[in-house]
Image: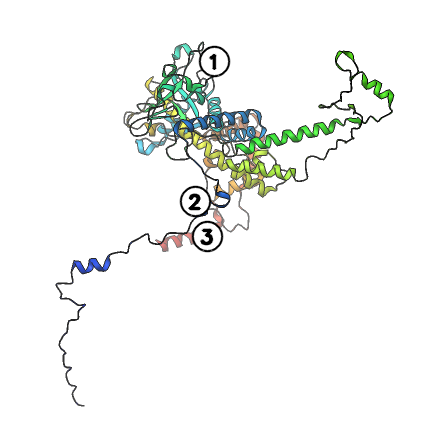
Amino acid sequence: MPALRPHARRPFRRSACQGTRASFGPSVVGRASSPLVPGVVQPVSRDAGAFRGTLSNYRPWRPSVVAGGQERTTASTRSEDLVANDWAGRSMVDTITLNAVGANGLFPQSTIPAALLGLDEEQARDIGDRMESIFRLWCESAGLEGQHFADLQFMGLRSTLVHGEMLHIPVMVDATKEGGFLGLRMQPVHPERLCTPSDKRAMHNMRDGVELDRLGRPCALWVAEPAPDLWSGRLGWGALGSDSFRRIPHRLFHRPGAFHCFRRTSEEQYRGEPILSPALKLFRHLADSLEYELIGQIVAASFPLFIKVADGTQGVEDYLGQFQQGPGGQGGQERVYHQSYAPGQVLYGNPGDDVKPLSSDRPGANWTGFVNFVVRAMGASAGIPYEALLKDFSKTNYSSARAALLEAWRVYMLWRQWQARSYCQPIYRMVIEEAYLRGLISLPTSAPGFYEALPLWTASMWIGPGRGYIDPVKEAKANISLIESGLSTYGEILGERGLAVEDVWAARGYEDRLMQRLAPRLAARLDAASSVAGAPAEDDAFPSDDEGDGDTNHDDAEEGDDAATA
């Protein structure tokens, strides 16, 4: 096979677009990787941002600081009027308040982290029980006027829903003269008294009664406190000068100086918004519509009888002449006009009048559907289903009713957790701090100091009213299944019912001991019934580990499998 001839190497020729190795440097890389000029192609126009079509007159605007405060005050006053005079507004506020706080309010359950404080569980539990007992005694006269702490919670949440915010001022009184052992008291104040004095409206750090520091944080509240003999209320709180206000610090070191609580839903928000604001027009217009329809029904139900007077009826004309006398007693020809009706009234018309019977054709055929739609829209504005707002479950089945209650329960829990986080927990911390300073609470010397671990010593979980069940049997079976499968705890399930696991088990233990002492036969029957009910079935595919000697092979097999796995 002839040998291949070596390939003749051609001389390298450098083209115009090629450079030397040294010239292939940063300048070439920079030219190759430079981006194009951005923003050449603009996106298509959005109808939401254009003034055309049906949105041509839709021009929202942002009011000034002073105008914004006036609008918020007007909305708050209208909301208060609706809750006082309108059934739908009252129902929404009461529904949320009763389910979120309830009649007995939220109560704390101490959750001191024993491991973080170097304590054992028994020590942490004893200290927590002591704190809970002190707080419950303080709750009896928590208000400045002697209100219970549950009543303060109810008023606070209700004020937040109606006015958008609550204002409670902590004050200290002489505990020995007030008949208590702690001096802390809470004074509820109407949020309308929080406003900017007339001589401080030009200050750049004032926001509708809230004074800001250099970082934009609230540092003080200006609360109107006019002299009773000089205040008539005609000009409003904003007409008062700063000499008729009290400047209350927002915080006094680590303690709140005032509880100005509201749910912040937007950035740079310093005052609250009533929950009825988004649907306030619906509430008002629906109330007016119902009133007009009710008046129409009353007029139609009176069923007046109208008699037309014809020519030639001299007797009737003489009778009507008694009521148609002109000035000076002279007979006149004035026409009779009827503007009010009474039930069963007989009305006589004038000669030539036409008879129009009053028929009851109101409301229209679509009136009920229209009212239901408006009520659903009003409930949706606050996250409350129609069934929970009107307490009407007549047209729902079990699944629909349960879905509606679960959806409403999320809203109730949102307000409950907000109330516990922004109001109840700080007050609980203030009460425990005063009790510690007065020597009512002693801490182990080996643990961190009270102020060194203040959030840990005062950690607690707040429990409110129970959720309630539609079908208690189904709910109980579901709870038992969750506990047996390890997906839930007794504390979680009892907490949903508004109960604490320690209180329930302590009461159960007391009842068992009482039954053994007073009704031993009944206790024996209940123990026998519970043992029979708790025994596994014969065809149980998953027997327990302590069934007895009859399952020796199964246990041996499991031990063998464990040994093989090890």
| Mark before the other along the chain sequence, 2 or 3 | 2
Foreground residue, 171 or 432?
Answer: 171
The reply to whether dot 1 and dot 2 touch (C-beta < 8 Å) is no
Q: Which of marks 2 and 3 is in front?
A: 2
How far apart marks 3 and 1 lie (CA) works out to 88 Å
Q: Position of residue 507 (x, y in %)?
A: 50, 28
* Residue at x-position 54% and y-position 25%: 81
Task: Give the numbered dot on residue 49.
Answer: 2
Instruction: Report which quarter residue 262 is drawn in.
Output: top left
| Mark before the other along the chain sequence, 1 or 2 | 2
Q: Where is residue 139 in the image (x, y as percent from the top left)?
A: 44, 20
Residue on which the image places disc 1? 232
Q: How crowded is mark 1: few (under 14 residues within 10 Å), some or many (20 or more)?
A: few
Q: Is residue 15 visible?
A: yes
Amino acid type at circle 1 is: Ser
How far apart marks 1 and 2 lie (CA) works out to 47 Å
Q: Is residue 187 visible?
A: no
Q: How crowded is mark 3: few (under 14 residues within 10 Å), some or many (20 or more)?
A: few
* Residue at x-position 43% and y-position 35%: 61
Task: Give the numbered dot on residue 554.
Answer: 3
Foreground residue, 453 or 302?
Answer: 302
Compared to residue 336, the image places residue 417 above or below, namely below
Amino acid type at circle 3 is: His
How far apart marks 2 and 3 lie (CA) works out to 73 Å
